[in-house]
Amino acid sequence: MVTGSYLVPGRDAETELEVKRSRFLCTLVRADDEGAAREVLDRLRRAHHDARHHCSALRIGVPPAVVERAADDGEPAGTAGAPMLEVLRGREVSDVVVVVTRWFGGTLLGAGGLARAYAEAVRLGLDAAGTRTRRLLVEHLVRLDHATAGVFESALHGLDVVVLDREFGADVALRIATSPERTARLASLVAAVSSGRGQVETVGERWT
């Protein structure tokens, strides 16, 4: 099953972490494109202009077409943006931009210390924001006669399928979404209840 995660709607988050007097402010915001992500970064730069670093990472889109970006914003290469992005990857979160704003506390943290701090800041932010799981479903168009359609829908219970739409005409057209691994079972069920007369057509995919 192909799955992913996204931020709970309306639950953008700000969390803080302090490490050896350096303050890390993590801001997580849902972003549907890179333009929206840049607006978030620009807004935070203006709001926290006294901070030395505004490091960022983003993941936008759904597999396999996920756009990823990371920026260290003056921190040593690979110590900020990359660890932040790895946390997003590990949680399989997309359509999100995360900015970690750092105020230097006077003590050098070293490359390892910086990487751990930026990654932990993002983990805390994701925990605070919360995520929802989404699944890639395959859409099918099933055509059955009226007498068989009711039997078919009753047989769907427990199969982890979603009936998206029904159209009634000379026959009944059901638009159904199911996980890719259930496609063969759906076709077998249609054949069984309709004595081979039903039709199943795969018409697309959707994330839900």
Image (cartoon, rainbow, N blue to C red):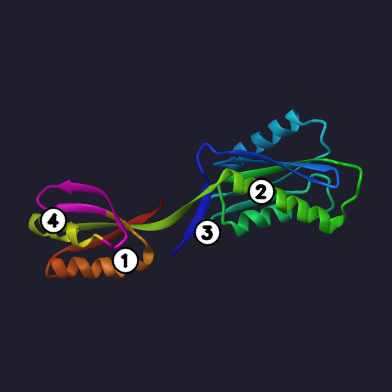
Q: Residue 169 location, x and y as percent? A: 12, 47
Q: From the image, tell me which residue sits under label 3.
A: 64
Residues at marks 2 and 4 touching, judged by CB atoms closer than 8 Å:
no
Write down the region rendered in magenta.
158-175
Residue at the spot of label 1: 183
Element under disc 1: helix
Which residue sits at x=71%, y=48%?
A: 121
In the displayed structure, does residue 197 sit left or right of residue 103?
left
Rounded to the nearest whole Å, what is the CA distance between mark 2 and mark 4? Answer: 49 Å
Q: Earlier in the sequence, mark 2 or mark 1?
A: 2
- Give me the C-alpha separation between circle 2 and circle 1: 39 Å
**Upstream in sequence: badge 3 or badge 2:** 3
Residue 108, disc:
none
Residue occupied by mark 2: 124
27 with respect to 104 (left or right):
left
Label 3, label 1: how far apart the Cα atoms are: 20 Å
Residue 150, label in figure: 4
**Residue 48 location, x and y as percent?**
76, 31
